[in-house]
Image: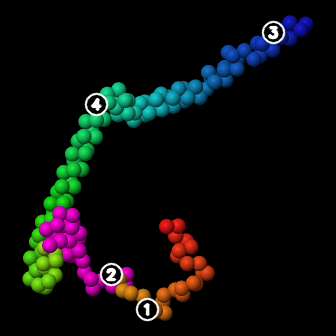
Amino acid sequence: MNATQNNAEKDRFAPGKLLAIFTNTRIMNYLVMAVVIHVVVIGALSVNYLLDKAFPSRVAERERVEKERLDAEKKAEEDKRAAAAAARAPAAAANAPNAGTNVVQAAAAGTGAAAAAAMAGVDTNHPIIKETSEAAAPHELPKANDLGISINDTNPR
């Protein structure tokens, strides 16, 4: 009696019978199609990664070309700034006798050329530059020991 009950239970939970409901529907077709689509999309998007891993010389060549391009752009930008500074230097020399010599001297210095070019076109009458560069009024300054600690207490140096 026990053996027939085990056989009936085995037949009831047989893989073929459990999967029978999926064979009569399209769910298995959709599942297979979804897996195939995922494999194709992920594979297509991974081609460059796989080629880079297989051929490391591709990566080195691409990095070299990118570095050369960045260096060329940087040099072109520096040349453009130097040309702009050289064009502004004679105009500044004509407007103010002392200021022109300072700009020319700054432009002559190798490290100060970019700073001189940047400062030559600055409009000092702009409201934001005036507001950030003007000194604070005495009533706007904080009290010496406003919080009970000094800057020496907070600065470990």
Secondary structure of the residue carrying tag 1 is loop
User: Can residue 26 be seen from the camera position used here?
Assistant: no
Is 152 drawn above or below residue 47 in the view shown? below
Nearer to the camera, 42 or 32: 42
For the record, the magenta segment spans 105-132
Residue marked by disc 4:
57
Q: Amino acid at mark 1?
A: Ala
Name the residue at 19% across, 51% down.
Answer: 72
Left or right: residue 23 compared with residue 98: right
Give the CA distance from mark 1 to mark 2: 17 Å
Q: Nearer the viewer, residue 142 or 39?
A: 142
Q: Is residue 82 magenta?
A: no
Residue 157 spot, x, y in % from top left: 49, 67
Q: Nearer the viewer, residue 22 or 141?
A: 141
Q: Relative to residue 130, is residue 60 depicted above or below?
A: above
Residue 129's disc is: 2
Give the mark toward the camera: 4 or 1.
Answer: 1
Q: Pick whichever of labels 4 and 3 is earlier in the sequence.
A: 3
Amino acid type, label 4: Ser
- State which mark lies toward you, 3 or 2: 2
